[in-house]
Amino acid sequence: MPTEASAPAARKPSVWRSFTEPAAWTMCLLGFSSGLPFLLVSVTLSLWLKENGIALKSVTMIASAGMTYALKFLWAPLLDHWRLPLFTRLGLRRGWLLFAQLGVLCGLLLMAAFTPLQLQPFVLATLLVAFMGATQDIAIDAYRIEIAPPSAQGALVATYALGYRLGLLLGGAVALILADHIPWSWIYVAMAVAMVLPIVTTLFMREPTVARSTPLGWRMAMRESIIDPFTDFFRRYSWVVAGLTLLFILLFKLPEQSIGTIFNPFMRDMGFSKTEIGAVTKIYGVWIGIAGAFVGGACVARWGAWQTLGACIVLGACSNLLYLLLLGNQGSLAVLTLAISGQNFAEGMLGPPTVAFLSLLVNRQHTATQYALLSSLVNLPGKVLGFFAGGLVAVIGYGGYFAITVISMLPAMLLFAILWPRFSKERPGDIAEAKEPST
C-alpha cells in the first residue's frame, strides 16, 4: 500500500509511453469524434452561409448553434442515470456515446441534403448536429473519468486533446480548402463518413466498470441525479466564494469565445481566399495551438493552475488586438500569419490551466454532471456575445468589436484578484474524491 509520500511519484507516468496504451489511442479517436462536428456548426458553417447570400447578422445567429455546447449541463444528469433502451447491451457510457455519434452522422447528412437554400430544415439539422455533439462530449468526459484512476487522467487528456485538434483540422482547414474545389454539401457528406471511425471505436472499446446505486423512488432519484450535484458546490465552498467563482468562470474566456462566429466572415472581408484561410488558420494555426498547449501544461506544472490561468487570460485577450493589424494590411499573408500565431498560441496556453482549475472544483461523487456544468458556464457568455456579433460589427465595425473583446477581460481579472487568496495555493494534485465544505 503506497504511503501519502510515495503517492505523487506514482502519479507521474511517462507522457510518451501513454501514446502506446490502448486507452490512450481510444481517447485520441474519441477526441477526433468530439472535435469534428464543433466547427461544422459554427466557424466553418458561417462561411457556407455567407457564400449563399445569408446576411451577416443571420449568419452569426445560425452559426451560434454551437451555443448548445454551453447548455449541455441541462441534460447531463440524464447520461448519468438513464440507460437508452435500444443500447442497453453496450452499457451506460458506450450506449449514450454511440447514440450521440450516430446523431451527429445523420445530422451532417441532413445538412448536406437540405443546404442553406432550404433554410428552416437546414437550421433544424444544424441544431441536431450541435445537440448530439454536445451530448457526445458529456459521454466522453464521463467515460474518460471512469475508465482510469485520477493518476492516469493527465495522459488521457493529452491524447484526447491531440485527437480533438485533428478533428478541428478536418472540420476546419480541410473543409475550407475543399470548399474551393467541390460543393459544400459534398464536404458535409465526407465529414459524416469520417464519423464512422469513432463509431467503430465505440463498438469495440470496453465499458467502464463502475458500481452505480439505483435510488429508490423518483424523489430520491431527482435529488441524487439533479439537485445534489448543483447544491454540493455551494456546500463545499461558502456561498460568497462559490458565487464569485461561478461568475469568474462565466467571464474569463469571454475574449476568446466571442471571436468564433465572426472570424471567417472577417477573413473573407479582409480579402483572403478559402484556401488561404484554411491553410493559415486551420492547419498552421492548429499546430501553433498544440505548441501553446504544451507550454501551458508546463506552466501549470511549474506554477500551478491558478497563477497560470491569470497570466493566460490576459495574454489571450490581448492577442485579439493582433487582428486590428489586418484592417490596415488587407490580404497580407504575413500579417495574417502573425495574428494567427499570437492568437492560437495564447488560446492553446489557456487550455491546460482551464481544465486543471475546473478539475480542482469538481467533487468526484458528481464528476460528470458538475464538469458538464462548469465547462458549459465557461463557454456560455462568449456564445451569447457571438450570437449578436454580426449586429455589433454592423454598428461599430470590426475594430470596435475586437476592442470590446479585449476590454471584456477586466471584470474577470477583478474577480481573479478577489479570489486569489482562496485558490492561489491549490494545485491539480490536490483534487480529493470529495472535499469537505469550506469553513
Image: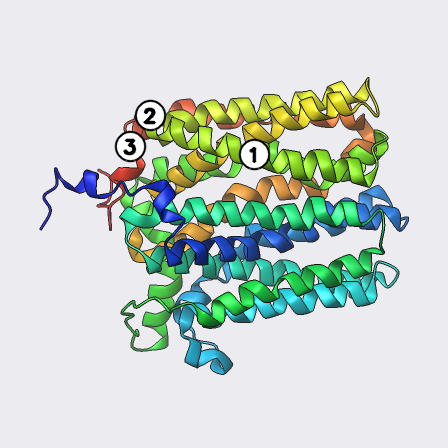
- Asked if residue 314 lies left or right of residue 89, the reply is right
The quarter of the picture where residue 422 lies is top left
Q: Secondary structure at mark 1?
A: helix
Q: Which mark is residue 417?
A: none
- The residue singled out by tag 3 in the image is 426
- The residue singled out by tag 2 in the image is 302
Closest to the camera, between mark 3 and mark 1, is 1
- The residue singled out by tag 1 in the image is 289
In the rendered image, the vertical position of residue 390 relative to residue 200, given as above or below: above
Q: Earlier in the sequence, mark 3 or mark 1?
A: 1
Closest to the camera, between mark 3 and mark 2, is 2
Q: Earlier in the sequence, mark 3 or mark 2?
A: 2
Residue at position x 43%, y 76% in the image:
90
Residue 321 place in picture, x, y as percent: 67, 21
Residue situated in front as seen by the camera: 140 or 360? 140
Q: Secondary structure at mark 2?
A: helix
